Image: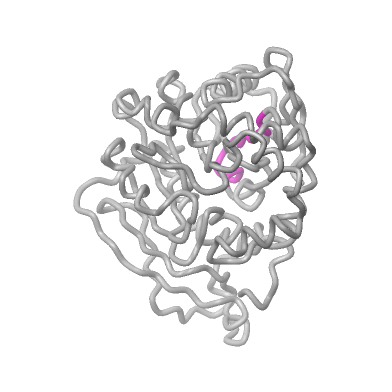
Amino acid sequence: MLDVTYISVDGVRSAVHDTRPGTKSDAVVFVHGNPGPMDDFESLIPAAAELGRVVALDHPGFGRADRPKVFAFNVAGYARHLAGVLDQLGVERAHLVMHDFGGGFGLQYAALHPTRVASLTLLNTGVLQGYRWHKYAKIWQAPLLGELFQLLASPKILKSALDRDNPIALPQDYVDRVMSYADWAHKRTVLNLYRATKNPDQHFARFGDQLRKLDVPVCVLWGEGDPYLPVKYAERQRETFPQAEVYILKGLGHWPFIDDPCAVRAHLIPFLRRALEGAPRASGKLHAQKVKLVPAHRAARRGLALCWRAPVLACAPEGAFRPRLPNLTFDAKSVPTTSTPCRFPGRSASRD
């Protein structure tokens, strides 16, 4: 679990993880979605923290944050709260890493504060022009039916539903963590948020014109098997961000950083390194290739210090980071290691 402190914006407290508190500087800022909380990113934060300052927060109604009865439970309200938190932390420019609803919160922040944004990373989220809500959103948006659905939700039901929808079964530890914060006030927050955002175009696409004017690096990472936000929206992010790097993560679902942290870090960390160092952005002809890595249990038998990760289809401008590892013959001593585990705790070996 991440170490946290608390910051209050307009009387509403959020739990905050800040690797370099008390400083005024740029920061990589992780913005979670539903159900959150910021611990979703615990497999990514240590590697990002090696590059610079990292900030993450629990949004009101999620995780360890307050459960206010009176709050603007919509994209604009959460974007304002995010701005207030970053102001108090002294974050001068944010490298936003966003997932799910966090994309709406973070992109609206970016549109309204363009000089305070240094880069954008979209994890299964983005500008969703023409998007229609998934089945659970429609249930949550329905009066009485949404309340009944939330009342009946249990760890067993949640895991069964998520495993049925997603290409990789989510680990029990992840489900247990989600449910540990799922008191009725949190469930009420989810209902309020979805009912306030019935028209996705008004909340996930309304700032497209402002976002097109942003001159910052953009990286899109999308689990190909996402049942809630279809993968077709990954490539469509170039309608708003023409020079975006787009990576389709084969065999992964809506939570690719839970399914396979290594696959996400393989693209996220080099992108953030370039953005933080101000390296020239890639541009030009697009390339696509498949990259297949050795599963961990097979690598161990071969004496390889490698992580499992799903095949990746990488579509990026020429010169962008694109791993080229079709034939891996390294021995264990020649392979760099990482201090961050590649599997989410609790991952069943039978799923590797």
Quarter of the image that includes the C terminus = bottom right
Q: How is the image coloured?
A: one colour
Residue extending farthest top: 10
Would residue 113 appear left or right of 262 to someone viewing this image? left
| Residue 245 percent location from the top left of the image | 34, 48
The relative height of residue 36 versus residue 320 in the rendered view (above or below) is above
User: Which residue reaches farthest bottom?
Assistant: 301
Give the percent coordinates (x, y) of residue 288: 28, 62
Q: Position of residue 190 (x, y in %)?
A: 65, 35
Image side of residue 338 versus residue 113, left or right: right
Q: Residue furthest front?
A: 144
Magenta span contains residue 197: no
What is the magenta range? Answer: 48-59
Instruction: Find residue 110 and report its image quarter.
Output: top left
Question: Which of the two residues, 48 or 125, is positioned nearer the viewer here?
Answer: 125
265 vs 54: above or below: below
Q: Which residue is at 52% across, 21% downward?
A: 76
**Residue 49 shown in magenta:** yes
The residue at 42%/42% (across/down) is: 132
Residue at screen point 49% across, 34% down: 95
Horizontal and vertical percent for residue 129?
34, 37
